[in-house]
Amino acid sequence: MRALHVAAALAVVGAGAAAAQQPQQDTRAQVRAMQYAPLRFQPPTPKRVMVAGVPVYLLADTAFPTLSVQIRSKRGVAHLPDSLWGVGWQADNLLRTGGTTKLSPDSVDRLVEFYALAVNIFTDNDESGASVSGLSRYRDQMLDLLFDVLRNPRNDSSRVRITAAQQQETWRRRNDQPGNVLTRAWGQVVWGDHPMGRTIVTPDEINGFTPARFRWVQERLFCPQNLLIGISGQYDERSLLTKLESLFKGWAPCASGLREIPAPQFPAGPRLVYVEKDVNQTSIRMGHAGGLKVANTPDYFASQVADFILGGSGFT
């Protein structure tokens, strides 16, 4: 038996040596020879309905017992008066952490945890948004909470103080990282005094953080005339639309006070700008104004695909 085992082992070794002696095939030729079926991407088309004058897009998906609600506002921080720019960038944080007129901040957190909800609120330069997702059987709980947060923000004073302290620390450490210095300089060079070019909240703006100022901003960014809603997942359409109608009932129309975003005046011609900082690390940024934005610009999405192909944001 031992002789047979040895013979088998020698046979295996001999076979491996023979394979190693064969010339390796050209992998590039193999790649070129690969055949793929044509890619056909047919995204589903959502159903569009109007609820209380607000466009709602519905896309049923029964694969999982979940529901996702996306709310978009067509107004962002750049639409605010300059004096409220810093408040606008923290208004989303206060909506999520500052409680509602009926619920304390801790009560909101407990509801989110109890029902295992994912809640997100954001403000950006030219749009704002909010979302909630969870199990579809908790549809009413998630919708009630999201609309309560948007319609009735408390902006608890203790959470306002925490937000102010965080922003003060950000200001104190604004020059710690070369990349942060470069980002601010880039905004100033490309955008000048335009609100889209600002990147950091100043101490004077932080001193103006009050619950009333946050409420002024929030009720103008998130109000019915500015909104679009998208809902996907498992739902009963008739009862869902009835629920949305009840949530919009009594919501006051958008108040005045916002502005259209002013047209930017980009610098002409090439420029080379040095920003001195005493560190042994160099950060380099180059580019130019592309003139593309989300609103009514189909080429924007093509530019996002091109950005991904080139390595994604940051050209890594």
Image: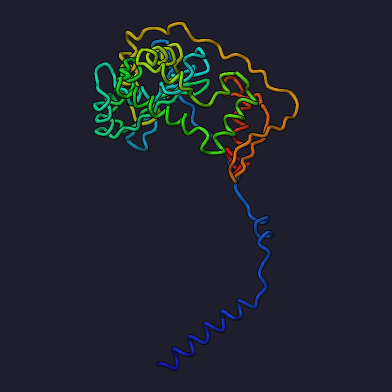
Q: Residue at x 42, y 27 (%)?
A: 168
Percent coordinates x, y for residue 81 in the rendering: 50, 12
Q: Quadrant of residue 117?
A: top left
Q: Residue at x 37, y 26 (%)?
A: 163
309 on left or right of 63: right
Q: Residue at x 57, y 32 (%)?
A: 183
Which corner quadrant holds the C terminus?
top right
Percent coordinates x, y for residue 263 in the rendering: 63, 15
Q: Quadrant of residue 223?
A: top left
Q: Nearer the viewer, residue 236 or 134?
A: 134
Q: Quadrant of residue 309?
A: top right
Percent coordinates x, y for residue 108 in the rendering: 27, 26
Q: How many marks?
A: 0
Q: Nearer the viewer, residue 60 or 187?
A: 187
Q: Is residue 186 visible?
A: yes
Q: Colour mode?
A: rainbow
Taking the view exactly as shown, the residue that stands out farthest to the right is 269
Q: Residue at x 42, y 23 (%)?
A: 90
205 on left or right of 297: left
Q: Quick check: 173 above or below 220?
A: below
Q: Is residue 69 visible?
A: no
Q: Nearer the viewer, residue 80 or 130?
A: 80
Which corner quadrant holds the N terminus?
bottom left
Taking the view exactly as shown, the residue that stands out farthest to the front is 278
Percent coordinates x, y for residue 154 in the rendering: 30, 17
